[in-house]
């Protein structure tokens, strides 16, 4: 039976048999025992599925990955140690030195650095594009060596909504997959596969964990992209892997090829595995994700409306506001709500923003977002403090932008707190 998403949050991934633990056990073990040398040999050859070393796979992690996979409507999934590791693996699994890919310029700063600076040193070139450009303009950025397109369902920190269908069509017209980072929307509010995305990534550190206890990531593959149909573009999946006795992933594993390769090669070689203990925390977070997301959205919309009418607030970005630039896209892709994050500016710019933030009592200043507790950050004073106003604007971040992550407290207390801080500036 196929369950609806709130039920999937509770029951997918771990389905205990008679007499087994009701809650997901933590397999806090680096290794797994076999009765014969031959049995373990078959695992190493990928001839049989099974556990042998937690750097590659662990039953606790696999159960949690399976839960997220079901929630996204995917074919296979894997956990990683962080969202950064998830996005790196997702791209590096199909791009090598000499290759090129395209990403929205509005993506999270950490991913922007990874793609634009660190992966460049590995010989992989990324072109950042304005995601609001029309299809024919975007098409001009593709090259013969382009291997993927990347965007975020809702961007961090500018809360812009990606036109997933437009980007999926564009990617497929050029024979490459679309990778979507679905961290802010979560599968509760958007399932990118339904709109044509091929691979989804998450920083599970955010809403999925939800309680600020564990850093983690996840990659989910829809299994829909036809690697063999574009064999010359993806030799890593369609030609023999010497490190596995000549296995051709796309032939041997079909729809499971992408995740099998990312596990067998990238996780084996780079080792950014999530600890089973953290996977357990993530699993607990997932169990209440649907409840929390509804509350985050409800609270954030009320806060956005409150800020919008306040005389000391210069501007507010929240996709659910009627007159927001991304409202039409939000109605299509996020009909039940977007997330708890909104961006706004106060009159007076950078200095006033700092004075306002220092007056807050309930909302805390933290380098975190998408958490059950209300928190906020001023990129110009924190994550991007080395940049001048001009450099910030070039990065698409207004110097007065405050990223407010609305939590699940009583919304009136959040508004009261904002109100007293605004009154003081
Ligand atoms: C935080 C974040 C990341 C990075 O995730 P970590 O878990 O911090 O490594 C990637 N993408 C988005 C959209 C994020 O918000």
Image (tube, rainbow, N blue to C red):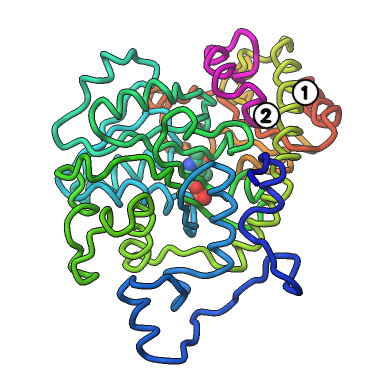
Local SS, label 1: loop
Q: In the figure, 345 relative to 84: above or below? A: above
**10 Å neighbourhood of mark 2: few (<14), some, or many (≥20)?**
some
The residue beneath circle 1 is: 424
Q: In the figure, 15 relative to 418: above or below? A: below
Residue 254 relative to residue 98: left or right: right
Residue 179 relative to residue 235: left or right: right
| Nearest to the observer: residue 265 or residue 222 | 222
Q: Are marks 2 and 1 in contact (CB under 8 Å)?
A: yes
The residue beneath circle 2 is: 355
**10 Å neighbourhood of mark 1: few (<14), some, or many (≥20)?**
few
Q: Position of residue 34 (x, y in %)?
A: 46, 87
Look at 60% across and 28% down and name the residue there: 402
Would residue 391 be visible to someone looking at this image? Answer: no
| Nearest to the observer: residue 404 or residue 297 | 297
Q: Position of residue 36 (x, y in %)?
A: 41, 91
Prevailing SS of the magenta stretch = loop
Rendered-image quadrant of the C terminus? top right
Within the image, what quadrant is residue 206 found in? top right
Within the image, what quadrant is residue 200 found in? top left
Q: Position of residue 152 (x, y in %)?
A: 46, 33
Local SS, label 2: helix
| Nearest to the observer: residue 129 or residue 164 | 164
Look at 59% across and 19% down and name the residue there: 319
Would residue 70 be visible to someone looking at this image? Answer: yes
Residue 108: say if magenta.
Answer: no
Segment tinted magenta in the rendering = 317-339
Residue 331: say if magenta.
Answer: yes
Look at 20% across and 20% down and name the residue there: 140
Say whether mark 2 is within 8 Å of ligand 1: no
């Amino acid at each position: 039976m196929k369950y609806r998403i709130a039920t999937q949050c509770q029951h997918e991934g771990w389905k205990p048999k008679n007499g087994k633990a009701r809650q997901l056990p933590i397999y806090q073990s680096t290794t797994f025992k076999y009765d014969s040398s031959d049995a373990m040999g078959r695992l190493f050859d990928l001839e049989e599925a099974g556990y042998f070393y937690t750097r590659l796979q662990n039953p606790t992690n696999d159960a949690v990955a399976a839960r997220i996979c079901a929630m996204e409507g995917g074919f296979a999934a894997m956990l990683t140690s962080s969202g950064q590791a998830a996005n790196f693996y997702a791209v590096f699994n199909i791009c090598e030195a000499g290759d090129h890919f395209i990403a929205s310029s509005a993506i999270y700063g950490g991913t922007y650095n990874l793609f634009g600076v660190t992966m460049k040193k590995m010989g992989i070139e990324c072109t950042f594009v304005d995601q609001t450009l029309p299809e024919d303009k975007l098409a001009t950025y593709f090259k013969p060596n382009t291997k993927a397109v990347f965007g975020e369902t809702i961007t961090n920190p500018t809360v812009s909504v990606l036109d997933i269908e437009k980007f999926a069509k564009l990617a497929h017209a050029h024979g490459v997959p679309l990778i979507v980072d679905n961290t802010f929307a979560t599968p509760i509010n958007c399932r990118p596969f339904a709109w044509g995305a091929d691979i989804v990534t998450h920083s599970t550190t955010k809403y999925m964990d939800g309680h600020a206890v564990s850093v983690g990531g996840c990659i989910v593959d829809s299994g829909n992209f036809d690697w063999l149909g574009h064999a010359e573009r993806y030799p890593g999946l369609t030609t023999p892997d010497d490190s596995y006795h000549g296995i051709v992933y796309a032939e041997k594993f079909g729809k499971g090829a992408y995740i099998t390769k990312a596990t067998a090669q990238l996780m084996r070689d780079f080792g950014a595995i999530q600890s089973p203990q953290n996977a357990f925390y993530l699993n607990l977070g997932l169990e209440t994700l649907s409840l929390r997301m509804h509350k985050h959205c409800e609270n954030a919309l009320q806060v956005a409306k409150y800020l919008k009418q306040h005389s000391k607030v210069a501007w507010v970005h929240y996709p659910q506001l009627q007159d927001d630039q991304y409202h039409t896209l939000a109605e299509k892709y996020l009909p039940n709500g977007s997330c708890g994050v909104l961006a706004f500016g106060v009159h007076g710019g950078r200095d006033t923003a700092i004075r306002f933030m220092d007056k807050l009592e309930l909302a805390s200043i933290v380098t975190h977002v998408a958490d059950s507790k209300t928190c906020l950050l001023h990129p110009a004073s924190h994550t991007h403090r080395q940049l001048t106003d001009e450099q910030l604007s070039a990065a698409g971040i207004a110097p007065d932008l405050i990223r407010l992550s609305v939590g699940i407290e009583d919304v009136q207390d959040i508004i009261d707190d904002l109100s007293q801080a605004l009154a003081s500036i």
